[in-house]
Image (cartoon, rainbow, N blue to C red):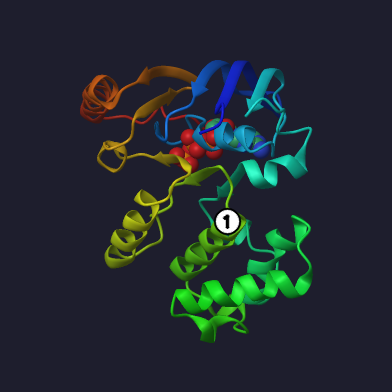
């Protein structure tokens, strides 16, 4: 595996609001889970790691490269799956959407098309090639976005709640498929169960790293804190 993703003293503010403060992290393990409550800053962290946002202060490095400065290098380095596929999909048909990343990487149209059709066939979904994206359900759109990323074979996959819109059999299939991938996976979740098999857990709270380490250390502390907060009959502590 490569040198991973490092954050050094990263702050991120938007519209005068401080979203992340002093984040210093080294994400080098093969399977990394990012846990935290709603609004804690998880998605922002992922977007910084993908170079979609530049830090307000500090620096982010992906395999030694600033992801916000070298977008082309990032196509091979990281692929990001957004929580909402509607924020990701650009093209009207499945085939065009799947081919887009490959075309950006410089592949000729005929080669990109061949890879897209081969993947659809391997997935038993050849009939989807000309289908309009608007005709797909949310779960099917999420699957489409994941396939688009897998076609590009990035070294690290950044997954923002990848199971949120999927039914249980599809979740199980996707879990098996993700588990078998050779790439580094960084997965956001609210649920400690879904990241229990990761090698490294990053717990974000209020825009800061609350804890980072092995699941045996971080998950009991996270569960205890969530249980404590659940006892408190108020949501005034929720970031907003
Ligand atoms: N563009 C923006 N403008 C204003 N506030 C923002 C913006 N982006 C993020 N925030 C704020 O930053 C905080 C963290 O947002 P973020 O989406 O990173 O949280 P999250 O941990 O991924 O939440 P969730 O689990 O609910 O998806 C939230 O309070 C959010 O309102």
Residue 177 or residue 58, whichever sits in front:
177
Q: How many marks?
A: 1
Q: Which residue is mark 1?
A: 149
Q: Position of residue 44 (x, y in %)?
A: 58, 34
Q: Quadrant of residue 100?
A: bottom right
Label 1 CB, ligand 1: below 8 Å? no
Q: Residue at x 53, y 55 (%)?
A: 84
* Left-right relation of 112 to 121: right
* Left-right relation of 84 to 103: left
Q: Is residue 105 visible?
A: yes
Q: Position of residue 155 (x, y in %)?
A: 56, 42
| Quadrant hosting ligand 1 | top right
| Label 1: few (<14), some (14–19) or many (≥20) C-alpha neighbours in 10 Å | many
Q: Residue at x 76, y 44 (%)?
A: 72
Residue 100 or residue 86, whichever sits in front:
100
Q: Position of residue 139 (x, y in %)?
A: 44, 66
Q: Is residue 207 visible?
A: no
Instruction: Identify the element where label 1 is drawn.
Output: helix
Q: Residue at x 23, y 23 (%)?
A: 216
Query: In the image, is residue 207 above or below residue 93?
Result: above
Q: Quadrant of residue 5?
A: top right
Query: In the image, is residue 8 above or below residue 141?
Result: above
Q: Residue at x 47, y 73 (%)?
A: 137
């Amino acid at each position: 595996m490569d040198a991973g993703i490092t954050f050094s003293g990263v702050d991120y503010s938007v519209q005068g609001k401080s979203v992340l403060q002093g984040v210093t992290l080294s994400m080098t393990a093969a399977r990394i889970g990012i846990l935290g409550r709603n609004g804690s800053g998880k998605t922002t962290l992922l977007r910084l790691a993908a170079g979609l946002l530049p830090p307000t202060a500090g620096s982010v490095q992906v395999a030694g490269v600033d992801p916000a400065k070298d977008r082309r290098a990032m196509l091979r380095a990281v692929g990001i799956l957004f929580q909402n596929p509607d924020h990701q999909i650009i093209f009207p048909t499945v085939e065009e959407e799947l081919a887009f990343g490959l075309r950006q990487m410089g592949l000729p149209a005929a080669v990109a098309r061949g890879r897209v059709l081969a993947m659809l066939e391997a997935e038993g979904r050849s009939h989807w090639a000309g289908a309009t994206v608007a005709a797909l359900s949310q779960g099917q759109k999420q699957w489409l976005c994941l396939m688009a990323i897998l076609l590009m074979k990035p070294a690290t996959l950044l997954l923002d709640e990848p199971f949120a819109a999927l039914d249980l059999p599809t979740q199980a299939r996707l879990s098996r498929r993700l588990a078998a991938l050779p790439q580094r996976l960084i997965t956001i979740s609210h649920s400690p169960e879904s990241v229990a098999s990761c090698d490294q857990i990053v717990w974000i709270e209020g825009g800061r790293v609350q804890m980072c380490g092995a699941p045996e250390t971080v998950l009991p502390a996270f569960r205890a804190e969530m249980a404590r907060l659940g006892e408190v009959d108020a949501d005034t502590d929720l970031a907003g």
